[in-house]
Structure formats: C-alpha cells, structure tokens
Amino acid sequence: MVQVAHLPSGITVADIIEIVERDGVVIIDDFVSSSWLAEFNSSVQAPIEDYQPYDYGEPEAMEFLGHQTVRLNGLISKSSNYIELMSDERLLGVMDHFLAPNCGQYRLNSSEIIEIHGGETAQELHFDDMIWPAHYWAPDRLLQFNVMVAGTDFTAENGATQVVPGSHLWDDPERVATPEEITQAVMKAGSAVLIPGKTVHGGGANTSGDRRRAIVTSYVLGWLRTQENHFLHTNLEQAREWPERVRQLMGYDLYSHYDENMGAGPLGYYEYRSPAVLFE
Ligand SMILES: O=C(O)CCC(=O)C(=O)O
Ligand SMILES: [Fe+2]
C-alpha cells in the first residue's frame, strides 16, 4: 500500500527536499515541541470555541470548505508563538529551494486552523496551485507550498489529510487518482506534513468524532496575491514588534526582484516607497 514517508525531526533541509522532490509529500515527525504545541493550542482554543459556522455561498464552496469544519485565519494575531512556526529555519530552507527560484522573495500565503469535526465528509481531492491562473499558464512552475502541523493526532478515522504521493509529477491536470494511489497523512500531534502546490490532496472524512486540528502555514511566490489578507488580520503596531524577516513574509515590504531570467516589481508601494520606511 502507498504511504507517506516519515522523517525524524533532526533531519537536514537537504533530506527534506530530496523526499519532497521524489514523492511530492513528506511527514516530519515531532516537528514542533510539545511545549510549543500546548501553548499554541491553548491560545487558539477560545477563537475555535467562538467560531460560528459560515455560509460560504455556493454549495460547491460549502462542500469544499466543509460543513463540519472550523476554519480560522490570522494566526499571528491569535497566538504569540506562531511567529516561530512561520519563520522556522527548516521551513524557510525548504521554501528557498522550491519557491525562491520562481520569485526571489516568497511570502506567507495563509495561516489557518482547519479543525475537522465528527461527521465531516472527505474533501474533494485537489492541488492548491489551481487557485491562481498562473498555474495553467506555466504548469511546471510551483506557486505555493503548504505545511500542516498536526495540532491533534491525525488518524485515519478523524480526517487525516488524504494525499496522492507522486501526483506532483502528473502531466494531466484532469487525471483522477485511483483508490490504490491515495493514502492518508497519519501522524502524531506536533508532526508536520509538507504538501507543495501541485500535489493532489484533500481533508479526510471524520468518522470518529474526535476533532482533527491542523495548523496550516502556506507560502506563495511574492508576486502573486496571497489567499489571506494579512493587512486586515494585523496592524502596524503589531508589525513594529516583529522581526524584519517576519514583516517581509507578511507583506509589509516592497516586492522587487530582477535577474536574467525574471523581472517583477516593484509591487506593494507605500507612497511610492517601501513600507520599510514605516519601521525606521
Ligand atoms: O484539512 C486538510 O487536511 C486539507 C485541507 C485542504 O487541502 C484545503 O482546504 O485546501
Ligand atoms: Fe488543499
């Protein structure tokens, strides 16, 4: 049976890259410490309990985003230790390899809680790059890269992400995975599954009733619009407290990148200058 490879937490960035290039997915066991996870989980518990189910409008959107699934954004404003996760050196090393060649400066695409509750059905299998037309213009260029840390154990019964190893290399965007090609990212709380934007995946069905919490961090090419509007989830006072690298990842900077293969920018002006002037 097809399975997702597991790597231990002390692994090098080069080893992570090798497996992601081969399989299009990898799990890193014990990616965050239990103390980090306990602190994060306690910070987001209240917003999760306050969550009001939202009518996303179209039935297809409801089906995709889930009828029994809590979805929240803006994690940097919900938990003070989220900064450590989004700027984790191992993750940035992986993004330097997979995203930087297509942009120069990648940034945070979205930060999400996806908590699947009992009775949720399996999400339609998909790949995340499909949301930008640029995927169809240049299908071989990676646009986005998703990292899901397990906030609770991910089990086959509580909705562990379904994933199709090898699908990142498929030529045919219409190809449908056979049941034998699909597996699940079963992992312990604190582990992480890495899923780049061309790999076919989807949330699993929750038949156990135990909540399945994912802490999602995704990165995107710096010249694409981010899925989450970070500027509405944060403000300048908060941004002044962040390290410069975090401000850049959050989009409080000027995007500008020119080399012999690619030019893009400047994008994201503040009064014709870099937003960096606000932090001097
Ligand atoms: O919750 C999951 O396991 C995956 C969710 C997902 O892929 C998505 O919403 O795009
Ligand atoms: Fe997805």
Image (tube, rainbow, N blue to C red):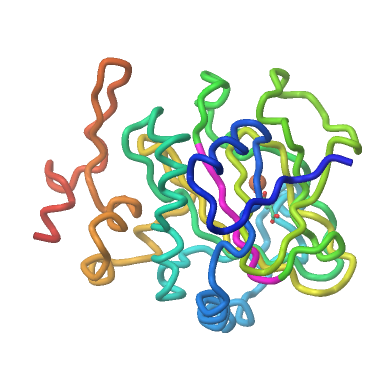
Image height of 149 relative to 138, above or below: below
- Picture coordinates of residue 230 (x, y %)? 39, 57
Q: Residue at x 36, y 31 (%)?
A: 103
Image height of 49 relative to 65, above or below: below
Q: Quadrant of residue 242?
A: bottom left
- Picture coordinates of residue 56 (x, y %)? 66, 56
In depth, the one of 8 and 44 nearer the eye is 8
Location of the N terminus (image quadrant):
top right
In depth, the one of 142 and 268 nearer the eye is 142
Q: Residue at x 46, y 65 (%)?
A: 74
Give, as a single range, the part of the protein colored magenta: 144-152
Q: Is residue 81 left or right of residue 45?
A: left
In depth, the one of 165 and 46 nearer the eye is 165
Residue 150 lies in the magenta stretch = yes
Location of the C terminus (image quadrant):
bottom left
Q: Is residue 198 left or right of residue 2?
A: left
Q: Residue at x 73, y 50 (%)?
A: 64
Q: Residue at x 75, y 44 (%)?
A: 163
- Picture coordinates of residue 227 (x, y %)? 49, 48
Image height of 115 relative to 19, above or below: below
- Tell me the chief SS of the magenta region: strand
In depth, the one of 261 and 45 nearer the eye is 261
Q: Quadrant of residue 256?
A: top left
Residue 46 lies in the magenta stretch = no
- Picture coordinates of residue 176 (x, y %)? 82, 29
